[in-house]
Image: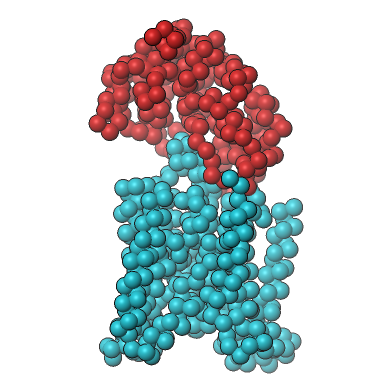
């Protein structure tokens, strides 16, 4: 049964991938091999699809790990303040950086933004770590993340307020999310980090499945719960940081996908569950990208518009279907 | 048959600023079902957590078959003692049988996909009387059924020492009675020492072989139950 589900979803994923690469917003003949040299295909469509795949899997992985760690179905990189931290750091680079000539180079606009995203994510994570040492991985840490997110949001507003219109527009576009910002070096970096993070997540899944029994029982089953929890925070920081840096703060995929995966797949084998979750994340990212690039409208919708339009109702349904 | 030995020597435990246990020593050399009683807040759970290595003792030595937990690595400890509490599990889509199989984690190699020892798992499931719910999901069962599953989970860990914190809390009357006789039978058949904190003193009285009553920082040991809460 579970194998059938896997195969069905892999087929669906390949279908969406084909649509994303060859169909939207305009049709490219897949059997016209001269198209491989076509700049549209190699410079735009393919990088965009690869970015969507990495971002989808990475965000879903973050959500799955955080939801298991906090035993809370609403946890995700967004809620923990990691995305806010990354956004703010990128905001500083884009907005404040524009007044410093050195920072305006093409190099800095890509690498600098990525590095800032990382730094922002890890600073918030480091603060969470300090909190976790005192309070453990309880709701206090989640609450801390939410409050940190609010504080950073206020600083962000201040930054927007003093920014000049051009920078503000650029930053504002970035914060709406896009899979089209990664080219060449940044794409390779993005792929490498996402793959590392997802493998790390996969390795953590089996001990994490034992931790559903509670920390005390898990420890007596041989799980080093502190180490596993710490690794989850680090892995989440890596993945959320890299996605936010390269694609912007993308909402909903991280929260919605793991819930749907658990509902559809219903397994105690968390390693398989993680693979299924990655797949659903990729599926949702591709779907959002396709919706954003449908040929019916001239505009390309930002990713966060489609993730919220699909993910919002999904999260609502999950919340309302829960048994209390 | 190899013998089972628990040796506790001059154990001192405190929690926050409060002393919970002052100088407790005991030695058990044979299979036993120890019934640990005491008022709410007396420190039964803390004592069990200390024995399980989850909390550090202030002073004293606990030896399991001659091994001190501090000299063993995590997996060795997991094969030596099992611990069960009555915490709720915040999951919905996990089958009871898979939950129970988590008890085999210490024996699982990284590449193993299918869990081992299904015969033993099925045996304990039958003995606990939960065959009919083993394929149900966590969101379909009651607290009592979950507690039975948690007990079986600890039993399949197949350790010489078993520490249980109020395993009968959510069980119905017949199940409580059955639980204590099952624990005793298992202890003697499989050569185990089972320590069980409980408030169901009368029900445990028939099956228990040793009775530890924790009150005012000291443990009174006897080989019959003290109905402490009745004759006050």
How far across and how far down the image is residue A29, in percent?
Answer: 72, 88
Chain A, colour shown: cyan
Picture quadrant where residue B215 is located: top left
Q: Is residue A204 above or below residue B101?
A: below
The foreground one among B36 and B202 is: B202
Quadrant where the N terminus of chain B is found in the figure: top right
Picture quadrant where residue B97 is located: top right
How far across and how far down the image is residue A71, in percent?
Answer: 49, 49
How far across and how far down the image is residue B96, in percent?
Answer: 64, 38
Residue at 36 percent across and 83 percent down: it is A94
Tell me if B55 is positioned left or right of A287 in this view: left
The foreground one among A299 and B35 is: A299
The figure's colour scheme reads: by chain
Residue at 32 percent across and 32 percent down: it is B56
* Chain letter for the red part: B
Quadrant where the C terminus of chain B is found in the figure: top left
Residue at 45 percent across and 78 percent down: it is A175
Residue A28 seen in render: yes
The count of marks equals: 0
Residue A272 seen in render: no
The foreground one among B66 and A296 is: A296
How far across and how far down the image is residue A147, in percent?
Answer: 36, 61
Most distant residue in the left direction: B17
Tell me if B93 is positioned left or right of B27 in this view: right
Q: Is residue B124 above or below residue A265?
A: above
Residue at 33 percent across and 89 percent down: it is A164
């Amino acid at each position: 049964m579970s194998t059938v589900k896997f195969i069905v979803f892999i087929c669906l994923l390949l279908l969406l991938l084909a649509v994303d690469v060859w169909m939207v917003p305009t049709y490219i003949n897949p059997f016209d091999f001269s198209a491989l040299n076509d700049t549209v295909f190699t410079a735009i469509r393919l990088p965009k699809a690869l970015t969507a795949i990495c971002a989808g899997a990475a965000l879903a992985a973050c959500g799955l790990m955080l939801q298991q760690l906090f035993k809370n179905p609403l946890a995700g990189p967004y809620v923990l303040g990691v995305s806010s931290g990354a956004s703010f750091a990128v905001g500083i680079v884009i907005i404040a950086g524009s007044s410093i000539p050195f920072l305006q180079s093409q190099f800095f606009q890509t690498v600098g933004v990525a590095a800032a995203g990382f730094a922002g994510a890890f600073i918030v994570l480091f603060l969470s770590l300090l909190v976790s040492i005192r309070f453990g991985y309880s709701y206090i840490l989640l609450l801390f993340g939410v409050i940190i997110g609010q504080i950073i949001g206020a600083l962000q507003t201040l930054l927007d307020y003093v920014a000049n219109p051009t920078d503000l527009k650029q930053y504002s576009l970035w914060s709406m999310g896009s899979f089209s910002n990664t080219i060449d070096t940044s794409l390779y970096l993005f792929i490498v980090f996402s793959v590392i993070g997802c493998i790390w997540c996969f390795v953590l899944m089996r001990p994490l499945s034992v931790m559903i029994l509670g920390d005390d029982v898990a420890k007596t089953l041989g799980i080093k719960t502190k180490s596993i929890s710490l690794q989850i925070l680090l892995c989440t920081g890596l993945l959320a940081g890299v996605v936010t840096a390269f694609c912007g703060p993308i909402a909903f995929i991280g929260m919605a996908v793991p819930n749907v995966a658990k509902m559809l797949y219903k397994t105690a084998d968390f390693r398989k569950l993680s693979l299924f979750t990655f797949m659903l994340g990729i599926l949702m990212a591709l779907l959002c990208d396709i919706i954003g690039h449908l040929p019916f409208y001239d505009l390309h919708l930002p990713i966060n518009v489609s993730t919220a339009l699909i993910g919002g109702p999904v999260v609502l349904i999950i919340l309302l279907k829960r048994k209390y | 048959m190899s013998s089972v030995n628990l040796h506790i020597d001059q154990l001192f435990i405190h929690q926050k600023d409060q002393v919970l246990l002052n100088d407790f020593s005991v030695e058990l050399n044979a299979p036993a079902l120890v019934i640990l009683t005491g008022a709410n807040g007396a420190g039964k759970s803390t004592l069990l957590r200390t024995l399980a290595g989850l909390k550090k003792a202030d002073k004293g030595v606990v030896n399991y078959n001659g091994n001190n937990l501090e000299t063993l690595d995590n997996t060795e400890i997991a094969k030596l003692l099992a611990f069960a509490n009555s915490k709720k599990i915040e999951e919905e889509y996990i089958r009871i049988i898979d939950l129970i199989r988590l008890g085999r984690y210490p024996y699982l190699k990284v590449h193993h996909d299918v869990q081992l020892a299904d015969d033993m798992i099925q045996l304990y499931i039958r003995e606990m009387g939960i065959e009919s719910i083993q394929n149900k999901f966590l969101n379909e069962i009651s607290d009592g059924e979950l507690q039975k599953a948690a007990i079986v989970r600890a039993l399949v860990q197949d350790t010489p020492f078993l520490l249980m914190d109020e395993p009968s809390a959510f069980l119905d009357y017949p199940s409580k009675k059955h639980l204590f006789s099952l624990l005793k039978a298992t202890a003697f058949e499989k050569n185990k020492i089972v320590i069980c904190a409980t408030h169901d003193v009368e029900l445990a009285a028939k099956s228990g072989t040793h009775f530890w009553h924790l009150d005012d920082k000291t443990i009174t040991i006897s080989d019959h139950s003290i109905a402490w809460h009745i004759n006050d």
